[in-house]
Image (cartoon, helix red, strand yellow):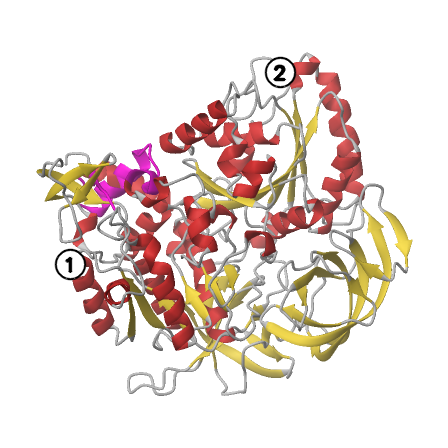
Amino acid sequence: MTTVASVSEETDSPYALSHLDALESEAVHIFREVAGEFERPVILFSGGKDSIVMLHLALKAFAPAAVPFSLLHVDTGHNFPEVIEYRDRVVAEHGLRLHVASVQEYIDAGKLRERPDGTRNPLQTVPLTEKIQAEKFDAVFGGGRRDEEKARAKERVFSLRDEFSQWDPRRQRPELWNLYNGRHAAGEHVRVFPLSNWTELDVWQYIAREGIELPEIYFAHEREVFSRSGMWLTAGEWGGPRDTEPVVTRLVRYRTVGDMSCTGAVDSDATTLEAVITEIAASRLTERGATRADDKLSEAAMEDRKREGYF
Amino acid sequence: MSSTTEQLTDIEGLSATTLLRFATAGSVDDGKSTLVGRLLHDSKSILTDQLEAVERVSASRGQDAPDLALLTDGLRAEREQGITIDVAYRYFATAQRRFILADTPGHVQYTRNMVTGASTAELTVILVDARNGVVEQTRRHAAIAALLRVPHVVLAVNKMDLVGYEESVFAAIATEFTTYAKELGVPEITAIPISALAGDNVVEPSAHMDWYPGPTFLEHLETVPVSHDLATCHARFPVQVVIRPQTAEHPDYRGYAGQIAAGTFRVGEEVKVLPSGRSSKISGIDLLGKSVDVAWTPQSVTLLLEDDIDISRGDLIVPAHDAPATSQDIEATVCHVADRPLTVGQRVLLKHTTRTVKAIVKEIPSRLTLDDLSQHPEPGQLVANDIGRVKVRTAEPLALDSYADSRRTGSFLLIDPADGTTLAAGMSGEAFAQPDEPGSETKSAPDEEGWDF
């Protein structure tokens, strides 16, 4: 039995799980708790690796039955085409229902205004919240991990949000044992983070172990990019590059997948999962530090966005 | 490309590590931040951009050295007030293990935070300053570790550099603490002399304490068993959801999905379903897509039974010969975690495993002072951070184990039905283990014979 074979023999009994098995079991337990206690759960699905791992875990948790949740994509309008293609293929393959909350529609309708820097990540909160309210979603799975960012390190697995999706870190419920308290009033919802205890490396190791397919932009490829705020951004309709920003072709890959305007590529020749894992294990930068312009806005940028209802 | 084979081996090596959840308990000036900072730093878990951010902020405040507490104080209020408000979870890894550290602050909501961190921990680190020895607070930490039945306790005697690395100082503290903790029923205590600041015995062995033959702090974390007593403990399986695909491919599949809360389950085993008391036999176990003959805690599995009996979320599947008693009257120790008090006569919801029932607080016989374990009879109510005994009557019978036997099936939450606030964390049965309980120190190794897989 593989679980037994993968135990470090010196210290642990044959019953000790490998860390990936332990994390997988915990996440599956969380998915099943939500299925048992909520009426209308939804998985936030961006086509990024964390949401892909979430969907994979949900598929395993309920097999051979179908996943009892739909998917929700908050579409900034600045998407990588490879990711949208991946999203649509996965939805079709598993017969899932996809909801889309479109930032572009809000801008077109005059309900949101484009920011001077062109970044749309902070604009996702209103379309997300209104979609949750309109669809009466009561549990919303997010792929957030506590190792990503220090405000997220204080996040609960079950995180209560009011009707404005706001997060109040001082009023969080203590979370003991594996007893998750999902009680909420009408209009409130609970954000659920099944990958809370995973690190970036765990996610990649799990993807490798399970043979999960990813959008190709996660692997090294030639791409036309330009430099802004110390990051390689992809030229595109969203507004880059400016005249002063020369476009160059480099061998890069993405460590995270988000809005094109604020997600940077990293120099990399890692074309396989194994090479990516080796690269991450040796990396001296966090994935957000390396690739996210929006988190550099201020020391509390993530906390502020979370309070306002961001994922 | 030439190193592909080597990399693959490395990946397998990484995925074969086990996971240890541990908690640190500490307060002002005991060197906890320094210890955690050194662990993270020496295991290369602090990355360049994080360290630069900490250095930048520390410098802007006129501090000479980077303040490693800034790494974990993730909230603006924490940074502004220079205190840690909430449990912070940190993640690091060595070649042997992945670690989840629940770093519990000493200032605000002290008891609540430490109880929260200890509830999932397999090991608790209690720090003492070698100059001060065992103080009131150390006893409080030991009491919480004992109450929460954390299997392993480490006493880190810190600042050994300030007492001349004297063996006698360490030995006296270790003996005093061990005696006290044993009386509380702490099953395993490991005392380690360290200097978090100088690095002695944290990651590297100390050059100043030849008299100490034991492992360094990190070596101990890497080698302490993370799984124990499985063969001897009561098997428990709370049903989370019933899986019924009702598709052409699986017209009759009916599986009971859940995470094994304790012990092991095998195909062919006679089981009983509580609270109904109906019996059946396990006909199959699905381990997330793989059919297995045996499964154990904390695996998430789907059990298939031979008989088509009525089972739903909240039921408990147990071995037919080892079923817990069901009762509507629960006696327990609770830690009160909410800002509003818990009072006699209060109507609450009680959440136990996957089952939530109505309940009423019948009595609060006593409140416990953790510093000296003194009892205060009939306090009338419990307020935030109080530990007390309660008697609760539930609307439906529950199959609660004693918390001493099973942390997962002996624990529960009390919830305010009005707004869902988590009021208290409960542990069924006696508060503390009896000292020198037979078998409390013995490992389960001999019992594992006969498991043939």
Nearer to me, A129 or A105 = A105
Q: Secondary structure at mark 1?
A: helix
Residue B32 position (above or below residue B380): above
Nearer to me, A45 or B403 = A45
| Tally of numbered tags | 2
Quadrant location, the N terminus of chain A: bottom left
Residue B294 seen in render = no
The answer to whether tags 2 and 1 share a subunit is no
Q: Residue at x 39, y 83 (%)?
A: B253
Q: Secondary structure at mark 2?
A: loop
* Chain at numbered mark 2: B
* Chain at numbered mark 1: A
Q: Residue furthest right?
A: B377
The image shows residue B361 at horizontal and vertical percentages of 79, 70
Q: Which residue is mark 2?
A: B209
Could you tell me the amino acid type at mark 1?
A: Pro
The image shows residue B95 at horizontal and vertical percentages of 40, 36
Residue B205 seen in render = yes
Callout 2: few (<14), some (14-19), or many (20+) C-alpha neighbours within 10 Å?
some
The image shows residue B339 at horizontal and vertical percentages of 71, 57
Q: Quadrant of residue A227?
A: top left
- Mark sitting on residue A81: 1
Residue A269 falls inside the magenta stretch: yes
Could you tell me the amino acid type at mark 2?
A: Met
Real-space Cα separation, disc 2 to disc 1, in angstroms:
61 Å
Q: Residue at x 33, y 64 (%)?
A: A55
Residue interval drawn in magenta: A263-290
Quadrant location, the C terminus of chain A: bottom left
Nearer to me, B435 or A245 = A245
Callout 1: few (<14), some (14-19), or many (20+) C-alpha neighbours within 10 Å?
few
Q: Is residue A257 left or right of residue A269?
A: right
Residue B396 position (above or below residue A213): below
